[in-house]
Image (spheres, grey):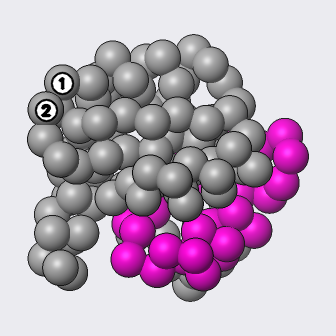
């Protein structure tokens, strides 16, 4: 396992389980089902990369993205959405998201996007 950590934020436990299976062994994987939990984990664990679902039950993913970047601007954030909405994607990029994924997401694409995000993080150090 590397020292690189991922925080995956999604209210769908099946997605959290699937993503954990994809990344465990290569990264330290932390998961949260709510935005409020993700903010606590962000402060406690300082993950390198956050994979953030835009549709959360307790707060807007866009608002959460802004809060993440405000608390930890060096954290690399990838957003996920169920539908490609140009306005939302543009807003996420304006707030500092490095990439976005549209569900359903295949494992190969997911791994590539995360590897690119990890490289971006390493280059910024």
Q: Which mark is residue 1?
A: 2
Dot 1 crowding, Cα within 10 Å, few <14, some 14–19, many 20+: few
Identity of the residue drawn at 69% across and 44% down: 37
First to last magenta residue range = 56-84
Q: Give the left or right position of residue 99, taking residue 92 as reference.
A: left
Whole-angstrom CA distance, mark 1 to mark 2, is 5 Å
- Residue at the far right: name it: 58
Q: Regarding mark 1 in the picture, which secondary structure is present there?
A: loop
Identity of the residue drawn at 66% across and 75% down: 66
In magenta stretch: residue 35: no
Q: Regarding mark 2 in the picture, which secondary structure is present there?
A: loop
Residue 94: quadrant of the picture: bottom right
Query: Which residue position holds label 1?
Result: 25
Q: Which mark is residue 93?
A: none
Q: Quadrant of the N terminus?
A: top left
Q: Is residue 111 above or below residue 59?
A: above
Q: Is residue 72 visible?
A: yes
Q: Are marks 1 and 2 in contact (CB under 8 Å)?
A: yes
Identity of the residue drawn at 21% across and 70% down: 120
Q: Quadrant of the C terminus?
A: bottom left
In magenta stretch: residue 63: yes
């Amino acid at each position: 396992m590397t020292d690189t950590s991922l925080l995956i934020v999604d209210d769908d436990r099946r997605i959290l389980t699937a993503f954990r299976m994809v990344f465990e062994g290569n990264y330290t994987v932390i998961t949260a089902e709510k935005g409020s939990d993700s903010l606590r984990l962000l402060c406690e664990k300082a993950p390198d990369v956050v994979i953030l679902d835009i549709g959360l039950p307790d707060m807007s993913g866009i608002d959460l993205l802004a809060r993440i970047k405000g608390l930890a601007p060096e954290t690399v954030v990838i957003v996920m959405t169920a539908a490609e909405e140009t306005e939302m994607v543009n807003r996420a990029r304006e707030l500092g998201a490095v990439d976005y994924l549209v569900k359903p997401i295949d494992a190969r694409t997911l791994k590539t996007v995360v590897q690119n995000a990890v490289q971006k993080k390493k280059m910024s150090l």
